[in-house]
Amino acid sequence: MTEPEKTEFRCINFSKIGRVEQFFITTILVFIFFVINGFFLELIYRLDGMKDHSWYLTMMQFLCYALFSLLNQVFFAGNVARRGEMRVYLLLAVLTVATMGLSNMAVGYLNYPTQVIFKCCKLIPVLVGGILIQGKKYGWVDFLACACMSIGLIMFTLADSKVQPNFNLYGVAVISGALVADAAIGNVQEKTMKKNEVKNNEMILYSYSLGFVYIFIGLVAAGQFLPAFNFFSQHPVQTYGYGVVFSISGYLGVNAVLYQVKAFGALTAVTVTTFRKMVSIIVSFIIFSKPFTIGYIWGGLVVTLGIYLNLYSNNKDYMYSLLHRILQHRINRQKQVKLEHGDIV
């Protein structure tokens, strides 16, 4: 595996520490930042009336992300010249607004753990869109992974509907829309990064800056900007205060994951983020009192199975190589033990 280029995650200088230490440090950071992110998102929506102003919260989040990426671009990247095409960034901004805005909005209508489980299942719209739009062909493992995710989502949603008095199907529709937009983002980002050699930070900078403008114009046009501004001003700590922490932790968490993808590969990064999501769900149940049923566990396990079937489908060669190295190591170890035993005898 190739060594990562100079890190874009600027909090820690990784150049003087080993790869094992890099992995453990970034994994801890991923868990810390995203658990904090999820905690404050759910805490914000505990405020009465907050779900009516979720787009204002998203606008604030976009502003924070844009400012952080601008600082990173100016002080660390050293080159502020744009490489990507503006028309692509205009499209990316629309998709990013849709996926993050709808995802935030869904928390006002769904249990936070249900929202997290849905966000794990991006493969479903990716697979459907690939077949209908691009005419792609997928293997049986991909369809099995998609089926597991679908069944797991149904199990988790049914469990949620049984124990949550305020369960709302509108929330399911909202988070499903976020998933579709998120799936489209991946295809556009991948194509743009390969074509123009665009860095992650530039893509974040333009996507969120333009997205902030979109949301601001939308709120003003819909007559929702002033009511949201007044609501946030009446509860500054629970809105602006918590919102800033929510945004900072989210931005740093994303950068930690991106570093892991570069340094250790997508398989390792997805494994870390999957377990992180499990921890976020557990923390949510522990800190925020909510009804619990065994159906949550079964649904979550089926979704997790689907995630790893998808990982297996996309990383067969790597997994076969890893399994071969593990088996070879065990064989060599057994031979060594036998030789040592023979020497003693």
Image (spheres, helix red, strand yellow):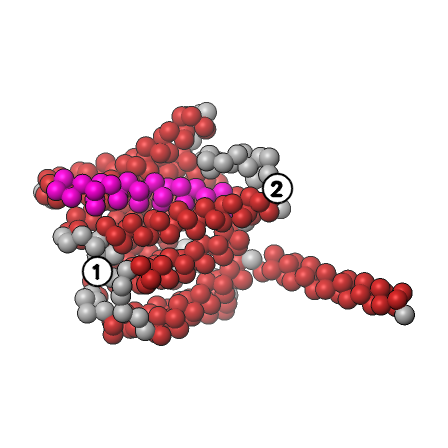
Q: Amino acid at mark 1?
A: Tyr
- 79 shown above or below 187: above
Q: Residue at x 45, y 46 (%)?
A: 29
Secondary structure type for disc 2:
loop
- The percent position of residue 157, horizontal first and vertical second, equals 30, 69
Q: Where is 77 relative to 307, above or below?
A: above
Residue count near mark 1 (Cα–Cα under 10 Å), binned few <14, some 14–19, many ≥20: many
Density class for disc 2 (Cα within 10 Å; few <14, some 14-19, many ≥20) is: few
Disc 2 marks which residue?
18
Give the residue type at disc 2. Gly
State the extent of the magenta-drawn residues as a range: 233-260
Which residue is located at x 27 percent, y 54 percent? 42
| Residue 116 appears in the picture as rendered | yes
- Location of the C terminus by quadrant is bottom right
Indicate left or right for 318 with 201 as reference: right
**Relative to 226, residue 28 above or below:** below
Based on the displayed image, in which of its 4 quarters is residue 226 positioned? top left
Label 1 sits on a secondary structure element that is loop
In the drawing, what numbered circle is on residue 215? none
What's the residue at 49%, 49% (across, down)? 27
Please check the rendered image and state whether residue 193 is part of the magenta-colored stretch, yes or no. Answer: no
Asked if the residue under mark 1 is in contact with the one under mark 2, i.e. CB atoms within 8 Å, the reply is no
Name the residue nearer the viewer: 158 or 244.
Answer: 244
Tell me the chief SS of the magenta region.
Answer: helix
Query: Where residue 252 sits in the image (x, y, percent)?
Result: 40, 41
Point out residue 277 in the picture as x, y percentages from the top left corner: 40, 57
Residue bearing mark 1? 109
Q: Is residue 251 magenta?
A: yes
Give the residue at x 48% y 54%. Answer: 272
x and y percentages locating residue 117 in the rendered image: 36, 62
- Between disc 2 and disc 1, whose residue precedes? 2
